[in-house]
């Protein structure tokens, strides 16, 4: 393990409080300005202690034994430091003291906790969620190396100051992905993930108290982006020259008419398509994020897209209903298409899910309870946010209409002559 730490051992003698003529002998371990004293359980007369040579200045047999013990201790502490280096463990004065004293209890570390969480969550969390935890780990490691000059830190060292300093680091450091620096909400998501893992350590009694107890996440409410009926129509009808861009548009439109998230759309197989109680095609699946069952009547425009790609080799061999495209590439093409359509708003693939909830369903009179079921929401309150957006849009449209109706109309010359 590479390290830029400074390591040193000094032997010191500190006078007893009860007897100023005698002193306890300690080994003082210093690593990058962090200090810990280890009692050697030996005493000497203050008058016999040589602070420059760090030895007892006497030829008495007892003094020789103490000096030999000091030499052995210094050598043993150097060995402990080298052992921690070779084993790629956290190097700190506390760790060296623990190893030197042979204490069996070993403190858990922050990165050890994160790795423990990520390993155990591999079969529970989706890859899309898990990769975000990996990114948080990278930022934590970067923070530790820059701030603490160390590869890891003991959980027992975590406190409120560490948490606030990490948040400030996230806001000011060079982003891992320069093309996509974290926003305020992005920073809060990293803090949220770290809090979840540290709280897990607290519940498992790896730490005596939760350092996040007084910390508050500060998310900024983001304006929900969705397409109007006119904007959706433009995207549906625009002629695109590249086949891959057309495929991206079709996947986006499919989501606009089904409300399915990216991962749920990609997971669709032929057995997810069935005949419902009304004799029409339905999609029956489970949301990967919440494992909630979704029963969704298939609208004609969505069915046309399934039919379009059903015989494509890559769809057939993957045993899926639709072709695959990475979420990152899909988002890029959707932004490009929106630009070609003159849509001046932030558009991503998830905009399609918002569009289904607002423009396609609620605006057309579908009850919010039904929309909630089709979206696979666990709480009705989550869906009611869309109702608020729709009402706000109606209010804005009506405000424009009121202004138009209240504008005074100029009389035509003929009307003015007739009135005379």
Image (spheres, helix red, strand yellow):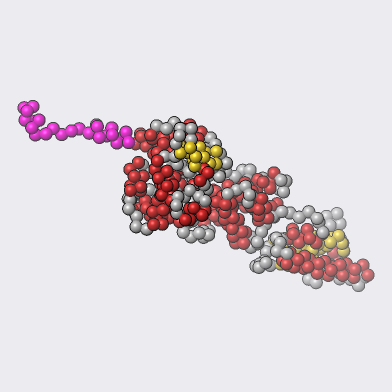
Q: Is residue 176 left or right of residue 58?
A: left
Q: Is residue 89 left or right of residue 275?
A: right
404 in magenta: yes
315 in magenta: no
Where, quadrant-wise, is the N terminus in this rendering? bottom right
x, y percent for residue 246? 38, 53
Residue span colored magenta = 397-420
Where, quadrant-wise, is the C terminus in this rendering? top left
Image quadrant of residue 16? bottom right
Question: Is the residue 84 above or below the residue 316 in the image?
Answer: below
Question: Is the residue 267 above or below the residue 22 in the image?
Answer: above
Q: Residue at x 40, y 51 (%)?
A: 249
Q: Is residue 74 visible?
A: no
Q: Main secondary structure of the magenta part?
A: helix
Q: Is residue 86 left or right of residue 405?
A: right
Q: Residue at x 48, y 60 (%)?
A: 178
Q: Is residue 246 visible?
A: yes
User: Which one is nearer the viewer's eye here, 240 or 216?
Assistant: 240
x, y percent for residue 327? 48, 53
Question: Is the residue 157 above or below the residue 85 in the image?
Answer: above
Q: Residue at x 67, y 52 (%)?
A: 116
């Amino acid at each position: 393990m590479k390290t830029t730490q400074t390591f040193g051992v000094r032997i010191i003698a500190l006078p007893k409080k009860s007897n100023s003529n005698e002193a306890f002998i300690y080994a003082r371990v210093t690593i990058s300005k962090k200090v810990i004293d280890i009692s050697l359980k030996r005493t000497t007369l203050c008058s016999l202690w040589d602070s420059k040579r760090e030895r007892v200045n006497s030829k008495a047999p007892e003094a020789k034994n103490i000096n030999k013990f000091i030499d052995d201790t210094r050598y043993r502490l150097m060995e402990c430091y080298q052992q921690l280096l070779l084993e790629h463990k956290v190097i700190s004065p506390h760790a060296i003291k623990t190893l030197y004293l042979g204490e069996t209890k070993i403190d858990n570390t922050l990165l050890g906790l994160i790795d423990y969480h990520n390993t155990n969550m591999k079969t529970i969390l989706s890859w899309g969620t898990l990769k975000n935890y990996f990114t948080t780990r990278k930022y934590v490691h970067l923070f530790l190396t820059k701030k603490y000059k160390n590869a890891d830190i003991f959980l027992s060292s975590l406190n409120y100051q560490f948490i606030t300093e990490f948040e400030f680091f996230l806001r000011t450091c060079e982003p891992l992905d320069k093309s996509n620096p974290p926003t305020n909400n992005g920073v809060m998501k990293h803090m949220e993930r770290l809090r979840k893992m540290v709280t897990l350590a607290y519940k498992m009694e790896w730490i005596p108290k939760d350092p996040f107890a007084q910390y508050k996440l500060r998310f900024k409410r983001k304006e929900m982006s969705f397409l109007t009926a006119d904007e959706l129509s433009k995207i549906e009808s625009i002629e695109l020259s590249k086949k891959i861009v057309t495929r991206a548009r079709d996947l986006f439109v499919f989501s606009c008419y089904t409300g399915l998230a990216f991962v749920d759309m990609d997971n669709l197989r032929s057995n997810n398509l069935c005949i419902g109680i009304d004799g029409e095609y339905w999609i029956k699946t489970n949301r990967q994020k919440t494992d909630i069952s979704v029963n969704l009547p298939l609208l004609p425009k969505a069915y046309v897209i399934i039919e379009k790609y059903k015989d494509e080799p890559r769809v057939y061999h993957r045993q899926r209903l639709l072709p695959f495209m990475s979420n990152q590439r899909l988002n890029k093409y959707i932004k490009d298409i929106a630009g070609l359509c003159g849509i001046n708003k932030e558009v991503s693939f998830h905009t399609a899910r918002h569009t289904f909830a607002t423009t396609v369903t609620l605006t057309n009179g579908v009850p919010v309870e039904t929309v909630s079921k089709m979206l696979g929401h666990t709480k009705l309150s989550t869906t009611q946010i869309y109702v608020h957006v729709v009402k706000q849009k109606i209010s804005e449209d009506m405000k424009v209409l009121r202004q138009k109706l209240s504008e005074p109309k100029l009389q035509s010359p003929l009307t003015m002559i007739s009135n005379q």
